[in-house]
Amino acid sequence: MTEEESGTPHWLFGDQLGPHFVDPARGGPHRDAPLLMIEARSVFRRRRFHRAKAHLILSAMRHRAAELGDRVRYVKSDTYRQGLREAVGDAPVTVHHPTSHAALAFVRALPSVRVLPARGFLVTHDAFRNWADDRGTKHLRQEDFYRWVRQTHDLLMDGDRPAGGQWNLDHENRQPPPRGATGLGVPAPYRPRESGIDAEVRSDLDRWSRDGDVEFVGEDAPRGFPATRREALAALRRFVEHRLATFGAHEDAVLAADATMSHSLLSSSLNLGLLDPAECVERAEARWRSGGVPLNSAEGFVRQIAGWREFVWHVYWYFGPRYRAGNALRHHERLPGWFAELSSDATEANCLAHVLAQVRATGWTHHIPRLMILGSFALQRGWEPQAVTDWFHRSFVDGYDWVMVPNVVGMSQYADGGRMTTKPYTSGGAYIDRMSDLCGPCRYKPSVRVGEDACPFTAGYWNLLHRHRDRFERNARMIRAVRGLDRLPDLEELLEQERDRRD
Ligand SMILES: Cc1cc2nc3c(=O)[nH]c(=O)nc-3n(C[C@H](O)[C@H](O)[C@H](O)COP(=O)(O)OP(=O)(O)OC[C@H]3O[C@@H](n4cnc5c(N)ncnc54)[C@H](O)[C@@H]3O)c2cc1C
Ligand code: SF4
């Protein structure tokens, strides 16, 4: 009789909440194995999380415990170690591979804990390692990985060819917002209704903060993201049926009055383990095959999940725990207090103020504001990448170590020196102006780089290129941009202006 068959307790972390984490047919615990969940207060003390994030995680854990009923022992303790001791003492426990280096090291160091394979991703660690080792290079590219996943998982394929004949439909998916529009005019995303469990969570969080035990940033508001499998499935269904069709074309566009555009808002459900990525991409593909959505939208969405999400997960493990400490550009500036506090009033840059206010209110904004406004600003100001990673981790409802480290250290801050992306993701105000309606009401002008009206992104962009000219000149994808510095008659003035910039 195996350990699982004998009913060894199985520990569920707070981001292992879906049925695929307790499925014996997929390497999970025996169907009668008692389950254990630990709500450790120290997790919330360690970082100043967004209030909405703390609420969502606790609500999701407590909802799951309520569903599992007598099968689960739910322990509220100070630390995981204490919770485990209280629940099982030194008795054996199984757990699925956790999602951070710190948590993995912790469970591996406990002799009574046996770690089962990871769940919640399409590709196994071994398969990725083989793929990456076969490349024989320290630079890994998402596009190559994505094509390999499409082939090996038979996703959007017609035989051995990509459906529609092309792997990449990004050229159809990078359109600016429709001219003159204030919104995409698509049905709103699913929003859950709060339950009695949410009321208890709210009262606990209020008490913790009142007692000075735990501090939060951001606003408390009705829970905006699914906390149960049922809610997450409703959100997925609504997205695939009503919003996927328009996902592709304006995927990168930003409109002030339409925060969600046609995005899925499924990241927090996927990262809590309420949804399995396979079911998300399969439903999107089925919708395309039945003629319900255009290929560019289905492909764009499949790329986000089977490409980017998977790639980011594996990069996190493949590059190891030291990857997070990367600082190739030697950026050491501290994050200003107003940014850390999500104080949108402190900056006159309309795009930044708008996005900070959105994050403060909801703990979420879509990919382009994360990358091309928040992350790009941090990169241009030379803020320390680890502090930026920590800020993103704390401030977003979907932030977890595995997803933040590659997205911030690699993709957004270029702190890994290009191991994950071919060039830094940053731009001047012209890009933000083209892709959004945020520049019109701004007191700065995106085309101006020096003087009273100088756009901080435009000036910041040139300043960054100048600072790292030597390195960027060696990058084929950056040479043209760097050479643009030689055509700036007012470069000295710009550099002086940026030295004194406060916001
Ligand atoms: C600086 C920065 C920080 C980010 N931090 C996070 C984070 O903490 N958690 C997180 O889940 N995503 C993060 N992302 C990726 C992406 O921005 C969010 O997944 C997405 O905006 C969530 O909204 P959505 O569910 O509507 O996504 P959609 O636009 O609808 O995309 C569908 C799904 O694809 C997945 N996805 C797409 N891009 C990525 C990516 N780069 N990495 C991982 N998954 C991806 C997500 O699961 C998402 O739900 C970050 C991106 C950047 C540039
Ligand atoms: S002008 Fe510059 S600072 Fe103002 S909204 Fe546009 S990009 Fe942002």
Image: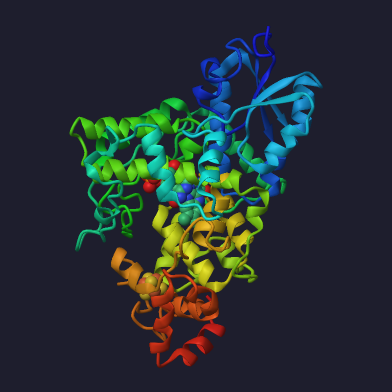
The percent coordinates of residue 102 (x first, y second) are 69, 42
Q: For the point 45% across and 59% down, which residue is it?
A: 371
Q: Please determine whether, in this image, residue 425 is positioned above or below residue 44.
A: below
User: Can you tell which quarter of the image residue 444 is in?
Assistant: bottom left
Q: Please determine whether, in this image, residue 300 is positioned above or below residue 199.
A: below
The percent coordinates of residue 458 (x first, y second) are 41, 77
The percent coordinates of residue 414 (x first, y second) are 53, 63
Residue 8 lies left or right of residue 196; in this view the side is right
Display coloring: rainbow
Tell me if residue 21 can be seen.
yes
Tell me if residue 362 can be seen.
no
The percent coordinates of residue 42 (x first, y second) are 72, 41
Q: Which residue lies most toward the right here?
A: 90
Q: For the point 30% across and 72% down, which residue is it?
A: 440
Ligand 2: quadrant of the figure: bottom left
Q: For the point 77% across and 24% down, which residue is it?
A: 112
Q: For the point 41% across and 38% down, which residue is it?
A: 149
Q: Which residue lies most toward the top here?
A: 1
Given residues 196 and 187, the one toward you in this image is 187
User: Can you tell which quarter of the image residue 55 is in?
Assistant: top right
Given residues 479 and 405, the one toward you in this image is 479
Q: Please determine whether, in this image, residue 182 is positioned above or below residue 66.
A: below
| Number of marks present in the image shown | 0
Locate the N terminus and report the quarter of the image it occupies: top right
